[in-house]
Amino acid sequence: MHSDLKNQKESIWVSWNENVQHNYIYHHTVKHERDLATIISSTFGKVRVYGSKQSSADIAAGTDSLIDMRQYDQIINIDDRKKQITVQSGITLKTLITTIQNRGWSLPCLPDIDTVTLGGALSTGTHGTGRDGKLLSEYMVNCRMVMADGSIREIEAGEELMDAVRVSLGLLGIFSEITLQCQPVYTLHLKEQPMHDEQWLGQFSDLLENNDFTRVLWMPHTDHGYVILGNKIDPDTKVENNPGPDYLKHRRAVSRMLYKYTTKFPFLTKFANKIIYKLFFTSKKESKGTLYDATVTKSRSGTLELAEWTIAKSRFDACFRELKAALDNSNNAAYVHIPMDVRFVKQDDSWLSYAYGEDCVTVGCVTRDAASADHYKAFEVVEEIFLKHGGRPHWGKRFEAKDAELSKIYPKWEAFKNLRTKLDPTGKFLNPYLADLLNVKSESRAV
């Protein structure tokens, strides 16, 4: 354990895209569970943990005391018979997935990136996509958590508490050791092509039902989406590899160049989107690979700012059509950078899951200019429409909804708040953002 105790001079914690900054006084790094428990039990006041700093929501800092989990990243145990792996919560998805794939295993619910820590990914509801896509936390069968008083609590799948902690923003306790249930690795045959909005929207249920992997990169202002479909095949099956024209690798650089001018002149976004679509999203592509190798972005070429909203599958059509009409309206000040990522998640029982109680569709919203995110009108338009249709925000991404709105869209919201008060009566794990989110007016300081 290393503690950097700056009693007189404050330091500044900065998120990866520099949009979130907070002063702090005490900074700790941990490598062992006992150190994590000791720091939490002895902290006077409030404490938050952080990993990759890639959340767009203000959840990882904002307290006098911070714990850096990035060195808390060891593999504890591998059970070959059960296909289970137990790891420390600071391990990155890259290390975790590489390790299990080398053993012939997989987690069939992978997100778009692999640079985040497992604890952060679970706590914020990171998810995959496809016919059987789930939240990553649904594969957690056991965990050890450090509670607000520093005690260690072990939680098994099947306990009601597990449904509460799977997605809990670090408010009920801090994930320490996590056991995941893996499945045999598989190979996907992927086909990618553009489709008119009416085409993919009209048949998205069939696409989802008839393919193991389904993802749509929607292109606002172009009337098209780029549809990615994948099906499991024998790894020895021959597939004609077609990565598309070589210039496709320059998409992000060209996008950054074009979007540079849309901050000052938002109406230019429509023209930029049409150019980007024509250049980079009209080619058909074909490939094969594991879910991890073929679908997960291994790095990002620059910072960005993200929002993501989820809507019940049964209400997606109406919600999407209203969103498309609003963004295409010539009187609308919100112009959206592309693509908007459309993914599909199976229902579950986790209290704060986006898919609690019903299958859902998630729609991402991105600005490539993170520095101007506070003035990006698309975030406001998307949130207003999704809330109108009962949509739910991604906990690790940008949104403005608070307790009043969240209590209407999460059936277990009040139960979660009551449990949080019971497990952390002094609010040790609350920062100002989270206190405001839950409408917690005041709680006594931790001692």
Image (cartoon, grey):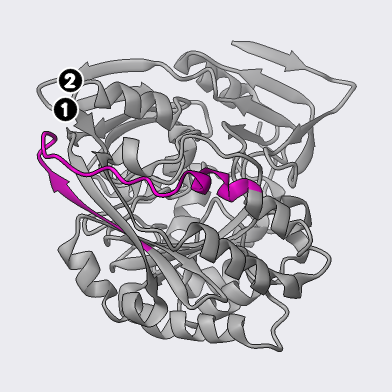
In this view, the residue in front, 162 or 215, is 215
Q: Residue 238 at what x, y percent from top left? A: 14, 39
Amino acid at the residue labelled 1: Lys
Residue with the mark numbered 2:
79
Residue with the mark numbered 1:
83
Q: Residue 28 at what x, y percent from top left? A: 65, 19
**In magenta stretch: residue 332:** no
Please state if 307 lies on the left or on the right of 354 as rendered.
right
Q: Do the residues labelled 1 and 2 touch (CB within 8 Å)?
A: yes
In this view, the residue in front, 149 or 380, is 380
In the picture shown, does residue 358 fall above or below 38?
A: below
Q: Residue 189 at what x, y percent from top left? A: 21, 47
Please state if 162 lies on the left or on the right of 181 as rendered.
right
Q: Tag 2, which secondary structure?
A: strand
Q: Residues within 10 Å of mark 1 (few under 14, many from 20)?
A: some
Specify the segment rendered in magenta: 227-253
